């Protein structure tokens, strides 16, 4: 097979890369002898974007140079953007040709030869929905088979094809490079990493020792790059002292060094379905600079005193030494807090941890209530997460917010506000995270009007939040679709430089004025920059960055965050195309998620997938509910194309 990433040949139970391809193909053809005797033909939209394949079985097992195990069954196939490339086996040689050349070659070969010993070829059919495979037969005729005809062969061969995860990883790496992101660390960064690991820096004796506290982390089940811990203590007057510990990444990742250079280029970790591209080397972000369980770590602690009404009364920031007592996962903690699951083992295994988490949960809800009174938006979008059975993609499942994710979110928002105010109090500039007042407010007004709800003509976060709360109560099933439409219309957040004395622009969606990103320095470069600013302010030393440099960094981080999001979306789309490829021709209920001169996009719910409407999109706008028909998928490009159906949604 040959695609954008090189030539491949699949043998049952094996996959060969481009270097081995020619040797394997030559050996197979030599062993086959008379082609007609050993090849059968089949074609379909394969689970890894293969546009057509040829299944064969040799009369006797053969040995390929460099491969110790014998081969008897094999698959030859074609792939590429829109399936326009093909592999041709002719007299023991391999060639790669485009679709037009393939048609002409097959036609001429069929006219010239009747022995069945000339050529084998495969190509994708119209719209990628049927696949044409030509084979020279003894009678000189060619054969064409549609996808439905060969579906049984496809199902029987699925296990022999290259893994879904491998293909998606190839797509992810290509997307990283196309978006100006580095998929790998340069040799100098690797050398610096090795030196850091070997040195294992000693603990700073000047740090405040808080290892005795019941610190815990709550993150995704498989997360190892742990940026923050939290702990709480009830005070005599009913207030609660909350401490958020953030990994002191700057202690090991020094400004201007090779690792910092890589982090500055990418500005964020990129999380794709097949592979994670960390901002910092794994040896650091998942170990030495991660707040791992039962490990002593340096941290920057944000201390807040929250009174019963949910406002922050006092705060301070300092450096300390901490120890994670329990590495917890969102889903398990949420189920327990909601009374729908047992106490997580790591919670019950630490004396006092149950009470500790309930205190944090109560404080988080109080903080959230205050923000929502000010107009913070209650949005519930659904993000699809790839699920693999081994290395094969099996599903795309919604990854929804829950009580534990909200607990951490509320504590981090409060901590970020404290950091922003602390820098401001020291006369330092800050990289603020802002979401401006929405430009498409008129469309949000129209959406609400369509549901019988009035909104004011000018943007108002409290009015929008009241509308969203009512809709969530009245239509909880449809609320994620409404949330997605509103999120699209609100626009994107961005990083801006705010100088001392400037008025804060604030974050429209969170209903906060003082806001920065500071709690994830292992994963986001703006947080690492903010940490360096904060440590300089606390130590009373000059700024680590020039003002002009900070301004450029704000713009660069916004741009790279957008590029990283596009890479993640590209791989999600490729995974979705992979999963939907056998369902071309089916119809789905959908909601319009984007409408601009560049195109119109819709999202279906099962699986939660977005695609482009290529026919019948006229008059559609964000938030409209429509009925669509899947007409094409392309795994390598991530294209999922729909036509608008005449059926009512």
Image (cartoon, rainbow, N blue to C red):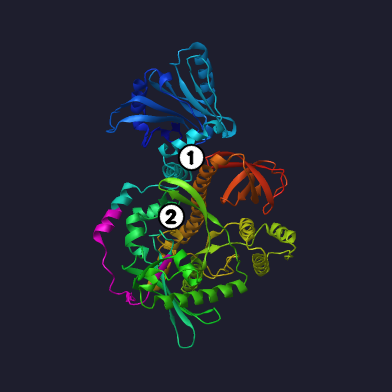
Residue located at (35% from left, 59% from top): 286
Q: Start and end of the magenta stretch? A: 192-218
**Toward the viewer: 345 or 296?**
345
In x, y percent, where is residue 452?
75, 63
Q: Please tell me whether residue 133 belongs to the stretch shown in magenta.
A: no
| Mark number, residue 269 | 2
Q: Nearer the viewer, residue 96 or 118?
A: 118
The x, y position of residue 347, in whole percent, is 39, 72
Q: Which mark is residue 47?
A: 1
Residue 14 in view of the camera: yes
Identify the residue at horizontal 34%, vertical 28% (top origin).
24
Q: Is residue 184 above or below residue 375?
A: above
Q: CA distance from mark 2 to mark 1?
A: 28 Å
Q: Is residue 202 magenta?
A: yes
Element class at badge 2: loop
* Left-right relation of 339 to 326: right
């Amino acid at each position: 097979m040959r695609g954008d990433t090189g030539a491949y040949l699949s043998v049952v139970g094996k996959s060969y890369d481009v270097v081995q391809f020619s040797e394997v193909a030559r050996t197979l053809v030599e062993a086959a002898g008379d082609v007609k005797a050993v090849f059968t033909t089949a074609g379909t939209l394969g689970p890894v974007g293969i546009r057509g394949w040829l299944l064969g079985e040799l009369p006797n097992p053969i040995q390929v140079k460099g491969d110790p195990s014998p081969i008897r069954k094999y698959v030859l196939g074609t792939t590429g953007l829109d399936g326009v490339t093909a592999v041709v086996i002719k007299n023991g040689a391999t060639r790669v040709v485009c679709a037009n050349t393939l048609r002409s070659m097959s036609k001429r070969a069929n006219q010239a030869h009747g022995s069945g010993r000339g050529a084998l070829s495969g190509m994708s059919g119209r719209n990628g929905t049927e696949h044409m495979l030509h084979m020279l037969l003894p009678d000189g005729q060619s054969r064409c088979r549609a996808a439905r005809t060969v579906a049984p062969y496809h199902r029987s061969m699925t296990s022999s094809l290259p893994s879904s995860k491998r293909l998606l990883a190839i797509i992810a790496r290509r997307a990283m490079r196309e978006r100006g992101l580095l998929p790998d660390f340069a040799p100098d960064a690797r050398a610096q990493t090795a030196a850091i690991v070997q040195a294992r820096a000693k603990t700073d004796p000047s740090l405040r020792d808080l290892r005795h506290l019941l610190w815990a982390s709550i993150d995704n089940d498989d997360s190892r790059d742990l940026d923050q811990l939290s702990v709480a203590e009830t005070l005599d007057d009913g207030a609660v002292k909350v401490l958020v510990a953030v990994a002191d990444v700057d202690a090991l990742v020094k400004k201007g060094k090779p690792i910092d250079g890589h982090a500055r280029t990418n500005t964020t970790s990129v999380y794709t379905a097949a592979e994670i591209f960390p901002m910092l080397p794994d040896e650091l972000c998942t170990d030495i600079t991660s707040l791992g369980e039962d490990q002593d770590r340096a941290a920057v602690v944000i201390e807040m005193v929250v009174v019963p009404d949910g406002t922050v009364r006092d705060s301070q920031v300092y450096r300390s030494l901490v120890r994670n007592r329990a590495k917890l996962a969102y889903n398990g903690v949420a189920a327990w807090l909601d009374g729908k699951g047992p106490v997580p083992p790591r919670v019950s295994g630490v004396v006092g941890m149950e009470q500790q988490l309930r205190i944090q949960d109560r404080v988080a809800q109080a903080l959230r209530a205050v923000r929502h009174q000010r107009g913070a938006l209650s949005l519930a979008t659904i993000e699809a997460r790839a699920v693999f059975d081994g290395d094969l993609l099996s599903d795309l499942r919604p990854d929804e917010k829950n009580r534990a994710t909200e607990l951490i979110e509320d504590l981090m928002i409060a901590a970020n506000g404290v950091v922003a105010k602390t820098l401001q109090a020291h006369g330092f500039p800050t990289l603020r995270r802002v979401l401006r007042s929405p430009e498409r407010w008129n469309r949000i007004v129209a959406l609400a009007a369509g549901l019988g709800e009035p909104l004011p003509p000018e943007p108002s976060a409290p009015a929008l939040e009241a509308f969203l709360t009512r809709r969530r109560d009245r239509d909880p099933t449809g609320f994620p679709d409404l949330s997605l439409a509103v999120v699209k219309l609100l626009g994107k957040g961005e990083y801006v430089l705010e100088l001392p004395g400037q008025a804060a622009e604030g974050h429209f969606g969170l209903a906060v004025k003082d806001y920065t990103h500071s709690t994830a320095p292992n994963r986001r470069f703006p947080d690492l920059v903010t940490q360096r600013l904060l440590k300089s302010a606390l130590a009373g030393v000059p700024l680590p960055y020039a003002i002009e440099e900070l301004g450029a960094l704000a713009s660069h981080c916004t741009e790279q965050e957008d590029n990283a999001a596009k890479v993640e979306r590209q791989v999600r789309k490729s995974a979705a195309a992979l999963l939907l490829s056998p369902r071309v021709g089916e119809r789905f209920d959908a909601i319009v998620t984007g409408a601009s001169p560049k195109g119109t996009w819709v999202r279906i719910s099962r699986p939660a997938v977005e695609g482009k409407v290529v026919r019948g999109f006229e008059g559609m706008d964000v938030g409209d509910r429509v009925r669509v028909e899947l007409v094409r998928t392309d795994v390598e490009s991530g294209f999922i194309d729909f036509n608008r159906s005449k059926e009512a949604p």
